[in-house]
Amino acid sequence: MSLAYPIARTLEEATRPGVKTARTQREAMTLSPGATVERLETSWLHLTEDEAAALVSAQGMEGPAGHLQRYEDTSGHVVVAVTWWKLADPKAPKAAPPPLPVPPPPEAPAAPDHTDDLYFRRGRTKPKRKRPADPNQLDLFDTGSGP
């Protein structure tokens, strides 16, 4: 059985039995015409042992699968995670889009870096003079014609 999540505007509505369910956001949009699916929301309910059992059993065997998950917190109390497709509230004003980032003003050209002067001004890195090759030395990598 695949995971199916309730489609609702509030958490209370998502935990009611018989609510519409969808596996994907596209399916949730199809099942709720005229509404906008904001996101897949996960909410946490701190319940007693009996309330958690009642909530899970109220969904029934034919209810959605995977949207209720039972956990325990560090104190051993029951916590139920409810995952549901959150519908946008049509009465709520739409949030203004975030402003575009303003590029920083151009910086003045940086002063030239003189770090190399610490190493090169005293001639410590001058190339060493090569001694001429000994004429008696055999050149193993000579590519010219030979005897």
Image (cartoon, rainbow, N blue to C red):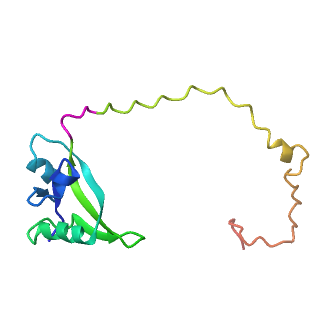
Q: Position of residue 56 (x, y in %)?
A: 18, 69
Q: Position of residue 38 (x, y in %)?
A: 24, 45
Q: Give the number of marks.
A: 0
| Front residue of 66 and 47 | 47
**In-image side of 140 versus 71 (left or right):** right
| Front residue of 22 and 26 | 22
Q: Establish if 5 lies above or below 147.
A: above
**In-image side of 29 versus 71 (left or right):** left
Name the residue at 74% across, 31% down.
111
Residue 139 lies in the magenta-colored region: no
**In-image side of 110 versus 120 (left or right):** left
Q: Residue lying furthest right in this view?
A: 122
Q: Position of residue 132 (x, y in %)?
A: 88, 60
| Front residue of 51 and 65 | 51
One can see residue 29 in this view = yes
Magenta segment's dominant SS is loop
User: What stretch of residues is rendered in magenta?
Assistant: 89-94
| Front residue of 47 and 69 | 47
**In-image side of 88 versus 139 (left or right):** left
Name the residue at 88% across, 55% down.
129
